[in-house]
Every structure is written in C-alpha cells, then in structure tokens.
C-alpha cells in the first residue's frame, strides 16, 4: 500500500492477513499492519522498515514513493524484527544512505545483523540532537521499555506528527473496519502492559509537544480526537480500571465450576441489572482477550476446579499472565471446586498476593463436586460483596 498522507509524507507499509499468531501467541483474526513512512524533503528520511513477510511489497511501495530519488536516512525507532527486518537490505540497496538511531539501538543492531557494516553510515541521536531534513525537523524522545529498551519516538515539528513506534498501535490490518479501543486495548495490555511506569513517563514528555497526528508502527494513523487515544493510554498505563464491571473467569473440567460461574452471573444480573458482567472460559476463549477484560473492569472473580492438589492449568496460565502484566488496583473474589479436597482458592490467592492494591473478597465459595442449595447462599453473599464494591 502506497498512500500520500501529506504533500511530502507517504505511507509505504503493508497489511498481513496470512499471519495466524502475532509475536507467536496473539490471535489476529483481522491481520496486522506493518507501518513505514517516507518524508520527502531536501533530505529524504524513511521511517522504519517492515517485517520480512512483507519485504517485497514494502520495497515496491518505497520505490514508488521515492519516484527515482535516493533516500538519505533510515530512521530506526524500534529494532523488533516486525519493523527492522529489512535494515540490511535497505543499506545494500542505497549505499549512500545512513542509519539514524540511538546508541542503545546501535549496540543491539549486530545481534540481528552480525555482518552489518555501519562505518561512516551512522547518525547517533538523543533528545538533544534533532535531525534537520529541510522544512521538516525531527526531534527524538527516548522511550525505553515501551516496550523494548532501545525504543524512541520522533516528533516532526513541521506537521506536528508523533511517529510513536509501537505506542498507540493496534491489531488489525488497515483495511479492517473495527473499533479502535477494543483491539488497541488487547494489543496494549498484552504487549506493553507490564511497562505502565515507562508509558507514563513517555506521556509526560509527549504532553509538552503540540501533537496533532500520531503515526504508529501498527494500526491506523490517528489524525483527530487525539485526546481520546491519549486518555485511554493514560488509563491503561496507570492501571486504573477503564469501566465498572465484573469479569468472571472460570476453568472447569466437567462443567460444574462453569455452572457455578454462570449462576453467579445470573445472580449478579438479577440483583443489579445495570452492572456489566462478562463471562470467559479460560480453556476455550482467547487468553489475550481474557487478560484484556481483567484490566478493563474493576472487579474480577476467579473460579477454578482443584486439579492435582492445585489450580487447573488454564487458570494457572491466566494468573501467570496477570502477574507478568502487573495486574493491580482491583477487587477479586474466588470460587473453588474439589471433589475431596478443595484447595484452588487458597492457591489462586497466593498466586496474586505479590501484586499491588488487590482487595480479596469474602466469602469464598467452596463447592464439593457440584453446586448445591447451601453453596448458592454463599454465592449470593459473594454477589452482594461484589456489588458493594
């Protein structure tokens, strides 16, 4: 795809609808875009490359955008292979062009390209070294751990564009008509979510800039209502719940724990019809979406069968994901099941105790094999505790 975004800025990225799992684990039913841009000024700068899966299309788009001219610079904001796979190929095609990046990225480059020779072909930048192209001047802002240590973003003072690297990206090809929030949230929580402190630091730096457009490395270019997107990033990166609601995440073997989770949902909706209640089957539903919903809502119920004296593996995996993404500032209730020695609640609670600002609710609903009338009394009590929060 070759698109003229502004009189002298072109999009030269590509959609990929053949990839099944992004980063080897995230389902992408609507594909992914690998974004790259060209700024054609007195000096020509190419902003990042693309994944090797899209090399041919990218080179064709680049050639069309250049229209016979030769690029002066390749600006490398992020070294992850889905954006940097074609650095060596670019340098071979344009032997007079130089790499523009920061010292950390420069040191990492040989890890991906052990034979790369950057003698007299490197421009090392930091936050005090702008890149002058002519009408356009790029200012660089270091963004370590958003979400790799070498990441930086670039601000074009002429058109007030933030080239934001992976920040403000989303799943989905560019030709996909879908809500930004949902797939951007799933992308952020699962990929960047651990690094909220670092994202907050970047947002503070960005607040000093007059940003009128955001051009990320995945997903659509954001050109209006930027306060909405920046506001979402502020919520997500500060680990605040985005919406009031309850996620009930269950892991069931024969269906009895599932039945208890479904009963709790029904009780909650009967007691408080206006309360949003979401149910997810951790053995069957998209794990990344379950993690996304755990961060989206302010309350969580964990329901698991006891398995080999511990937690059923799908629940164990879910808890590991919550830990790895620094889950915090939420209220959590528990349902456990076990035919002879229910122990899942204690194990689930222990798995979360190292996280910040979690409130664990009582009572714990403890079922032996199947839900009974006496268990439903406890279930109603847990529902009341959830709704009181």
Image (cartoon, rainbow, N blue to C red):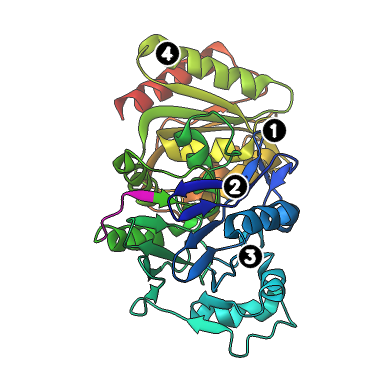
Q: Residue 216: x percent and y percent?
A: 48, 52
Q: Is mark 3 on a helix, strand or loop?
A: helix
**Badge 1 is on which residue?**
283
Is 211 on the left or on the right of 20, as rendered? left
**Badge 2 is on which residue?**
2
Q: Which of marks 4 and 2 precedes in the sequence? A: 2
**Badge 3 is on which residue?**
84
Residue extending farthest front: 68
Q: Which of marks 3 and 1 precedes in the sequence? A: 3
Q: Is residue 303 magenta?
A: no
C-alpha gap between disc 2 and disc 4: 50 Å
C-alpha gap between disc 1 and disc 3: 35 Å
Q: Which of marks 2 and 3 precedes in the sequence? A: 2
Q: Which of marks 4 and 1 precedes in the sequence? A: 4
Mark 2 and mark 4 residues within 8 Å of each other at the beta carbon: no
C-alpha gap between disc 1 and disc 4: 24 Å
Is 251 on the left or on the right of 162, as rendered? right
Which range is magenta?
Answer: 209-213
Task: Residue at 47% x, 20% y: name it.
Answer: 379
Q: What element carries label 2?
A: loop
Mark 4 and mark 3 residues within 8 Å of each other at the beta carbon: no
Q: How crowded is mark 4: few (under 14 residues within 10 Å), some or many (20 or more)?
A: some
Quadrant including the C terminus: top left
Q: Residue 269 carries which label?
A: 4
Task: Residue at 75% x, 83% y: name it.
Answer: 115
C-alpha gap between disc 3 and disc 2: 19 Å
Q: What element carries label 1?
A: loop
Task: Residue at 46% x, 47% y: name it.
Answer: 5
């Amino acid at each position: 795809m070759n698109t003229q975004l502004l009189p002298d800025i072109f999009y030269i990225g590509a959609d990929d609808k053949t990839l099944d799992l992004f980063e080897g684990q995230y389902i992408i039913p609507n594909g992914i875009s690998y974004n790259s841009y060209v700024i054609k000024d007195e000096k020509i700068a190419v902003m990042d490359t693309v994944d090797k899966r899209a090399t041919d299309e990218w080179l064709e788009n680049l050639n069309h955008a250049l229209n016979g001219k030769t690029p002066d610079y390749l600006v490398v904001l992020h070294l992850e292979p889905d954006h940097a796979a074609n650095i060596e190929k670019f340098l071979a095609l344009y032997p007079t062009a130089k790499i523009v990046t920061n010292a950390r990225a420069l040191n990492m480059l040989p890890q991906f390209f052990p034979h790369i020779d950057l003698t007299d072909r490197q421009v090392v930048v930091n936050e005090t070294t702008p890149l002058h192209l002519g009408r356009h001047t790029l200012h660089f802002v270091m963004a370590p751990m958003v979400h790799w240590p070498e990441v930086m973003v670039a601000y074009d003072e002429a058109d007030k564009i933030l080239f934001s690297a992976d920040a403000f990206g989303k799943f989905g090809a560019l030709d996909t008509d879908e809500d930004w929030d949902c797939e951007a949230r799933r992308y952020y929580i699962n990929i960047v979510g651990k690094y909220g402190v670092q994202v907050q630091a970047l947002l503070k730096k960005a607040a000093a800039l007059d940003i009128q457009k955001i051009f990320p490395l995945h997903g659509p270019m954001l050109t209006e209502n930027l306060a909405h997107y920046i506001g979402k990033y502020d919520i997500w990166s500060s680990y605040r719940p985005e919406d009031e609601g309850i996620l009930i995440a269950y892991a069931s073997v024969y269906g009895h724990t599932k039945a208890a989770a479904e009963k709790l949902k029904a009780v909650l909706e009967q007691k408080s019809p206006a309360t949003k209640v979401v149910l997810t089957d951790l053995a069957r539903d998209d794990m990344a979406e379950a993690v996304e919903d755990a961060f989206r809502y302010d309350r969580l119920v964990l329901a698991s069968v006891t398995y080999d004296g511990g937690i059923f593996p799908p629940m164990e995996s879910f808890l590991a994901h919550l830990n790895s993404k620094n889950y915090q500032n939420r209220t959590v209730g528990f349902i456990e099941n076990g035919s002879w020695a229910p122990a899942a609640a204690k194990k689930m609670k222990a798995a979360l105790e190292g996280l910040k600002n979690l409130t664990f609710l009582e009572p714990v609903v403890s079922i032996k094999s199947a839900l009974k009338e006496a268990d439903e009394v406890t279930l109603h009590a847990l529902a009341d505790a959830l709704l009181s929060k």
